[in-house]
Amino acid sequence: MAAIRVLLVDDRPPVADLTATYLERVSDDISVCIETSAGDGLSRLDDETFDCVVSDYDMPRKDGLEFLADVREEAPDLPFVLFTGKGSEEIASEAISAGVTDYLQKGSGSEQYEVLANRIENAVAQYRAEREAREATEQVRRMHNRITDAFYALDDDWRITYINEQAADFVECSADEIVGTDLRQAVPEDAGEEFYEAYREAFETQESVTLATESVLQPGRWVEERVYPSEDGLSIYFRDITERRRREQTLSALHDATRELMHAETEREIASIVCRIAETVLEFPGTGVRLYDDDRDALVNVAIGGEGAEEVDERPIFGIEDSPHGRAYREGETVTVEVDEAETDDLGPFSRTMYVPMGEYGLLSVGKHEDEPFSESNVQFVEILSGNARAALDRADRESRLREREQALETQNERLEEFASVVSHDLRNPLNVARGHLELARRTGREESFDRVAAAHDRMESLIDDLLALARKGQTVGRTEPVAVADAADRAWENVATEGAALEVESYETVEADPDRLCNLFENLFRNAVDHAGDDVTVRVTASDGGDRFAVADDGPGVPEDEREQVFEYGYSADGGVGLGLAIVKGIADAHGWAVEVGESEAGGAEFGFELDG
């Protein structure tokens, strides 16, 4: 999306600065200008161009709704978002009635600014799409204004004194048949009320009058008339605007239908709506949307409208190098094809087809049976629809990424809560022990009390180390590469105090992994085996042929079946330990996309199995 200039009006400079900072940080497309009063905001709008206004409600001298009313007088369609800390249903209802684009109540935390930025981007995208549609309407109107006008003249008695060839052709009569006719006899007043009102106004005011209405003599056709009074009657110029009227109606219907795109959430939903609009509004018997598939480097059909709408999965996939579809997508230009000349491209049952790119997302195709080439307006309408579809896909992509960020924030908050729970529970116990024995040591000087303080400190240090390991290594992986399971296991065994324990590695397979994280995983499993099975435990590492599964097993007491779902939880420990080692293992597995489960080994101990296709 092009850069978005936002005018932010808030009478509290610190709040305004904070809002502007967050908006520009959340979206690279947004730049913010700040004013601290409605009056200064109006002056700024007079001097500069902005894409959106964001205003507080509760401001001195003129509140946000009064400011909105002033803005609407000068810029009726400019997006205006009321962003206020003082919210109520009454204010929201009044704002909507006053024509506010969006209403958002301030809250705590940075998430509100991401929501505000998203609302601004959506409002501006729709505003720009509507403006482009209006500009396209004006372009079509100017294009059809070049038609030569028809003309006829009336005298003071409403008799036709002259009619040119264009006017005579329109009413399908010769000039000789019409000249001298009383218009009121040819056209009854009750049938041509609008015309007669315009003519009387011109007679009475001696000023020109313009009207556009349906023709009385040719029902179903529209005319635009310009009536000029003179000393002896009226001079009337008119033109047939039927085609222009139809185009305007089509553009209006296209604009209204396109609004639905702004509420669609997925690419396929947008594609289906686009096909339906091309079929019902633009009246093409065949429509289709193909989206670019990066994995296949091809255009894949996802929606069809009109004829063959049930055959979407049967339509061929086109590469971007060897088809009209690919040429349109690759070059970013509309391509039209006369199908008889390109039958080998399997373009369907239509005489002519058109392919219009939708940016990097894919393309819209339409087909028709008529032999005549696509008209200029045909191309314009499809390109307008394609542009609006691209804007909708941009918006859907932004909202999808926003939802992913929100989900990531939610997950992060959950992890922080889990960390807080572990820290508050496990650190408090040794801390209280240390405090108690420190006080006792001060009073008695017992050496045993100092030893207990030192032991408590050692336990806290061990817990902090495990917490840092989980925070730094548990949920992330770096670059992955083929890693020999045996090498990673041997390396990890050297890093763990195994004393009399034994390691047996029965694997020559490799797995795709981050070497350091895989080593961390083995270290925690080995340490867990020694802690729970004793110094004489035997640990076996195995991997299946093909490297799609590996396992770590021991001959210790194993994990009770009713506890196997809990062992990976933060802080869970069957023997009062810290309870983070297996949480780290689960985090590393999740980060690689592996599934992990705990079961019973052949020796009756614990076995941790990892499915690499998750």
Image (tube, rainbow, N blue to C red):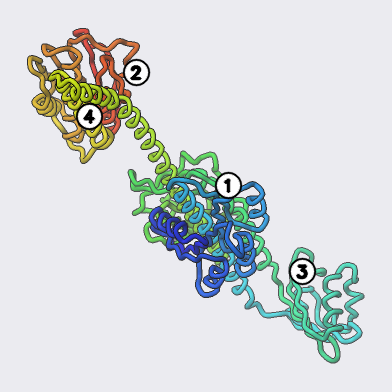
Say left or right for 322 vs 378. Answer: left
Q: CA distance from mark 1 to mark 2?
A: 53 Å
Q: Would you name the residue on which mark 3 appears?
A: 213
Q: Residues within 10 Å of mark 2 (few under 14, many from 20)?
A: few
Mark found first going from the N terminus, 1 or 2? 1
Q: CA distance from mark 2 to mark 4?
A: 21 Å
The answer to whether residue 243 shows anywhere in this view is: yes
* Quadrant of the drawing holding the N terminus: bottom left
Q: Nearer the viewer, residue 522 or 143?
A: 522
Q: What secondary structure is found at the residue carrying circle 3?
A: strand
Give the x, y percent position of residue 255.
Answer: 60, 58
Mark found first going from the N terminus, 4 or 1? 1
Q: Would you name the residue on which mark 2 appears?
A: 565
Q: Would you name the residue on which mark 1 appears?
A: 306
Which three-letter amino acid code belongs to the residue tagged 3? Thr
Say left or right for 139 vs 166. Answer: left
Of marks 2 and 3, the one in the foreground: 2
Q: Would you name the residue on which mark 4 appears?
A: 466
Q: Residues within 10 Å of mark 3 (few under 14, many from 20)?
A: some
Of marks 4 and 3, the one in the foreground: 4
Name the residue: 77% across, 67% down: 214
Q: Are marks 4 and 1 in contact (CB under 8 Å)?
A: no
Name the residue: 57% across, 63% down: 78
